[in-house]
Image: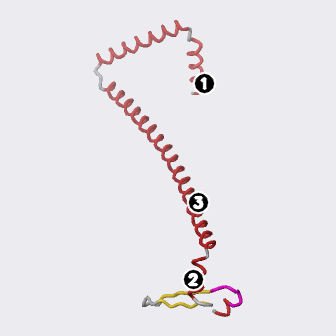
Amino acid sequence: MENAAAKSSTGLAIIVFSPGDRPYSFGHPSVDSVLDEFLHNGNLLEEYDLLLELNQGSNINKLKDEYNELMDALQVENKKKERLKKAIAIAKAKESDVTRVEKLELNELKKLKKSMEGIHKQIRKRIDEEGLHEIVNNRRNRKAHNK
């Protein structure tokens, strides 16, 4: 050990603990002088602190970025969830309407038909008043073409 330290003109200290937790130290020129130089060399400690701070800052920034990405993904998934809930509610409402119509008696079905015919007449009247024939015909043609 002394040869390696002497050849490189540096101090060297090794501290080990035995299985019985007894410390053993070896050093050149001495353990105390090497540790004193290491502990009192302000530049070395400042550089170490700076590197540690930069590394921690970098890790914090990475974690913040990852957190923000996850929060964005969560918002997207929550929006999907809300759209699915609405779609399910609409589907259930339509299913409920069909079930209700299927349970109607003949006289109730006749009333429903008459009501729908009245709504149809009102829509026709509004189309005539507003001059929307062209728009309605274009939509009909598109639907027929898509079938």
Instruction: Find residue 137 and name its label.
Output: none
The residue sitting at 41% across, 36% down in the picture is 88
What SS does tag 3 mark?
helix
In the rendered structure, which segment of residues is drawn in magenta?
6-11
Label 1 amino acid?
A: His
What SS does tag 1 mark?
helix
Residues at discs 2 and 3 in contact (Cβ within 8 Å): no
Does residue 111 sit above or below 70 in this rendering? above
Circle 1 or circle 3, nearest the eye: 3
| Relative image position of residue 126 (x, y in whole percent) | 49, 9
Does residue 136 sit above or below 71 in this rendering? above
Q: CA distance from mark 1 to mark 2?
A: 89 Å
Q: CA distance from mark 1 to mark 3?
A: 60 Å
Q: Name the residue tied to disc 2.
A: 35
The residue sitting at 60% across, 24% down in the picture is 145
- Ranked by sequence position, the earlier of labels 1 and 2 is 2
| Relative image position of residue 142 (x, y in whole percent) | 59, 23
| Relative image position of residue 8 (x, y in whole percent) | 70, 86
Q: Name the residue tied to disc 3.
A: 58
Label 3 amino acid?
A: Ser
Does residue 7 sit above or below 137 in this rendering? below
Residues at discs 1 and 3 in contact (Cβ within 8 Å): no
- Ranked by sequence position, the earlier of labels 2 and 3 is 2
Circle 1 or circle 2, nearest the eye: 2
Label 2 amino acid?
A: Leu
Q: Residues within 10 Å of mark 3 (few under 14, many from 20)?
A: few
Which quarter of the rendering shows the N terminus? bottom right
The residue sitting at 29% across, 26% down in the picture is 103
Instruction: Find residue 145 and name its label.
Output: 1
- Ranked by sequence position, the earlier of labels 1 and 3 is 3
